[in-house]
Amino acid sequence: MTTRAGFVALIGEPNAGKSTLTNQMVGAKVSIVTHKVQTTRARIRGVAIEGDAQIVLVDTPGLFKPRRRLDRAMVAAAWSGASDADIVVLLIEAHRGITEGVEAILENLGEVVGKRPVALAINKIDRVEAPRLLALTQQMNEKFPFTETFLISAEKGHGVNALRKWLAAELPESPWLYPEDQIADLPLRMIASEMTREKLTLRLHQELPYQLTVETEHWEERDDGSARIDQIIYVVRDGHKGIVLGNKGETIKAISKAAREELEEFLGRRIHLFMQVKVREKWLDEAERYSEMGLDFKDGNG
Ligand SMILES: Nc1nc2c(ncn2[C@@H]2O[C@H](COP(=O)(O)OP(=O)(O)OP(=O)(O)O)[C@@H](O)[C@H]2O)c(=O)[nH]1
Ligand SMILES: [Mg+2]
């Protein structure tokens, strides 16, 4: 029996729905999702099976015009995800169409992908009328020689099966890259940190989510089958610490509860989750913070 396997990079502007699509194809939440831009910070690998094919989805940070060191490292990680993959899928948002950001991605795309297949996925089709999709498909295909175009709703699942089947058929013949029951390739510690960061991002406003990071410091297995997890939330200012803690600690309590519940569901066991907020003015310029996030510090140079 021949099997197929390989890497499929999902790229696109922030908020395009890359992480939602990753989770939809995997059938479980392996990558965090929020309504805010720049949620994903590093490459997150999720594994989907379609017939004899193992599709390793590489969810990437959104591509945008970077300002800070962290932004540059994120964008570099996204492009390198595309250049390492067997197949690239560019996601755009149906209701936003061809934005400046999409134009900027198209300018670099050809050089990065070379001869590899690139599919276009027009996402969030639940938000527009059908005639608009036809025009958008045509305009995009005039700008870039996409191998195939898919109209999807990553959230509702429309069109996702067709995309998965196509990807499976396009992947090279290869033994599977992961055990068949593995759905993600990132350390549990990082999954735990990401879940907390998702809850923080959903709850905190303006710039704050972009100026914090979460690290899982300690993970202790207990005899009763539960685990104790200790996390640190790094923020850049005292004022931010106060906001994260909230009045009488109620904000952090709510965040911690939401993160713990999700983690317990993911792991299928009891978790004791402890969080500490630390002010670390310069964490955005510390190499160790980047390696903890799964990013290359030097990519943030220049
Ligand atoms: N209406 C609609 N919303 C969607 C769809 N897919 C994703 N979304 C929403 O779009 C927002 C962004 O989704 P994400 O999956 O986090 O987007 P992303 O591309 O991973 O974003 P970054 O990680 O910031 O680059 C979330 O609020 C999703 O619920 C869709 O098919 N339809
Ligand atoms: Mg994402």
Image (spheres, grey):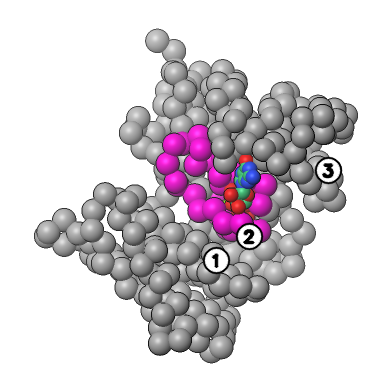
Is the Cβ of the residue at disc 2 closer than 8 Å to that at disc 1? yes
Which residue is pictured at 53% across the width and 79% down the height?
A: 235
The disc labelled 3 sits on which kind of residue? Answer: Ile
Residue designated by label 1:
201
Majority secondary structure in the magenta region: loop
Q: Is mark 2 within 8 Å of ligand 1?
A: yes
Which comes sooner in the sequence, label 2 or label 3? 2
- Front residue of 155/178: it is 155
For residue 128, what is the image quadrant? Answer: top right
The disc labelled 1 sits on which kind of residue? Answer: Thr
From this viewpoint, is residue 217 visible? no
Residue designated by label 3:
98
State the separation of the CA atoms marked 2 and 3: 20 Å
Residue 68 locus on image (x, y percent): 70, 69
Residue 261 locus on image (x, y percent): 34, 59
Residue designated by label 2:
36
- Answer left or right for 161 relative to 187: right
For residue 252, what is the image quadrant? Answer: bottom left
The disc labelled 2 sits on which kind of residue? Answer: Lys
Question: Please, which residue is most extreme toward the front here?
Answer: 129
Q: Point out the stretch of residues depicted in magenta.
A: 15-43
Q: Is mark 1 within 8 Å of ligand 1?
A: no
